[in-house]
């Protein structure tokens, strides 16, 4: 299984051979180091632990890894060894991958923005400060709010996985990958890129 860690740079667009515009997300994939290889005999499952973005020597402590980000990928082929360097050359144009990352945080939001509610009342005939309220949240019989009710609250900052993204371009010189479409997170978000089984 192919896997790598990267950082979201932003969105751009490229043109294909027919002249059609393709929206792409650029991901910076600097060299990743294999820190640990887990086996079924020893750990109960097969996986590889990867470190990304090496820290300066002054920030490395005894209790901390030498990398800013450390993530684990499940593997079943045993193709990696401790000390191996992974770069974006593991992927080729046309590869189908899945991306995992943390979405943009939007803070505390009301029901209209968070769930797409239309608002309680119309904007005329003496209606004051009630345009975007959610209205009744329960009924008299249980005398409580039913679990799972869609209410205002924190929005975003959730781990999201997007599947079936196509690798449009692999730039080995600038250590970037161009992926067709959008991926979760703001600029600088850590992304886990892996090939789909």
Image (cartoon, rainbow, N blue to C red):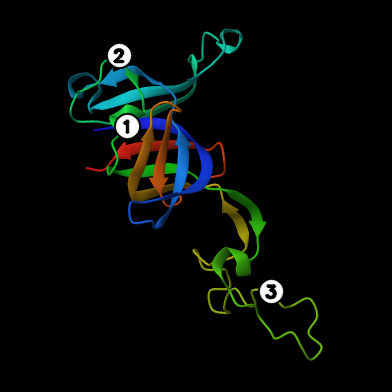
Residue at the extreme bottom of the image, as rendered: 125
Q: Give the answer, above or below, for where 109 lies relative to 164.
A: below
Instruction: From the image, tell me which residue sits under label 2.
Output: 82
Around disc 1, counting alpha carbons within 10 Å, would you say few (fewer than 14), some (14 to 19), or many (20 or more)?
many
Badge number at residue 3: 1
Question: Which label sits in the foreground, 1 or 2?
Answer: 1
Closer to us: 142 or 183:
183
Q: Is residue 30 left or right of residue 144?
A: left
User: Residue 151 appears in which quarter of the rendering?
Assistant: bottom right
Badge number at residue 132: 3
The quadrant of the image that shows the N terminus is: top left
Q: Earlier in the sequence, mark 1 or mark 2?
A: 1
Tell me how far mark 1 sits from mark 2, CA to CA: 15 Å
User: Residue 136 appears in which quarter of the rendering?
Assistant: bottom right
Question: Which label sits in the foreground, 2 or 3?
Answer: 2
Badge number at residue 131: none
What is the count of numbered marks? 3
Q: Is residue 73 left or right of residue 128?
A: left
Image coordinates for residue 119, horizontal then vertical, percent: 64, 77
Tell me how far mark 3 sits from mark 1, CA to CA: 44 Å
Image coordinates for residue 137, horizontal then vertical, percent: 60, 73
Query: At 57% from the left edge and 40% from the top edge, which residue is drawn?
Result: 187
């Amino acid at each position: 299984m192919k896997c790598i860690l990267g950082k979201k740079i932003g969105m751009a667009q490229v043109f294909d051979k027919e002249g059609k515009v393709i929206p792409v997300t650029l991901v910076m994939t600097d060299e990743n180091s294999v820190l640990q290889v887990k086996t079924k005999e020893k750990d109960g499952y097969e996986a590889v632990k990867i470190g990304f973005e090496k820290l300066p020597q002054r920030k490395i402590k005894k209790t901390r890894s030498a990398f800013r980000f450390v993530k684990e990928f499940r593997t079943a082929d045993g193709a990696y060894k401790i000390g191996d360097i992974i770069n974006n050359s593991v992927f080729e144009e046309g590869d189908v991958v899945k991306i995992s990352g943390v979405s943009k945080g939007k803070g505390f939001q009301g029901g209209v923005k968070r769930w797409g509610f239309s608002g309680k009342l119309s904007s005329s005939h003496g209606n004051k400060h009630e345009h975007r309220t959610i209205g009744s949240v329960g009924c008299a019989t249980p005398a409580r709010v039913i679990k799972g009710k869609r209410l205002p609250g924190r929005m975003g900052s959730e781990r999201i996985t997007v599947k079936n993204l196509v690798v449009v371009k692999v730039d080995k010189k600038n250590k970037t990958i161009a992926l067709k479409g959008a991926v979760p997170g703001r600029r600088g978000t850590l992304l886990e890129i892996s090939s789909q089984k």
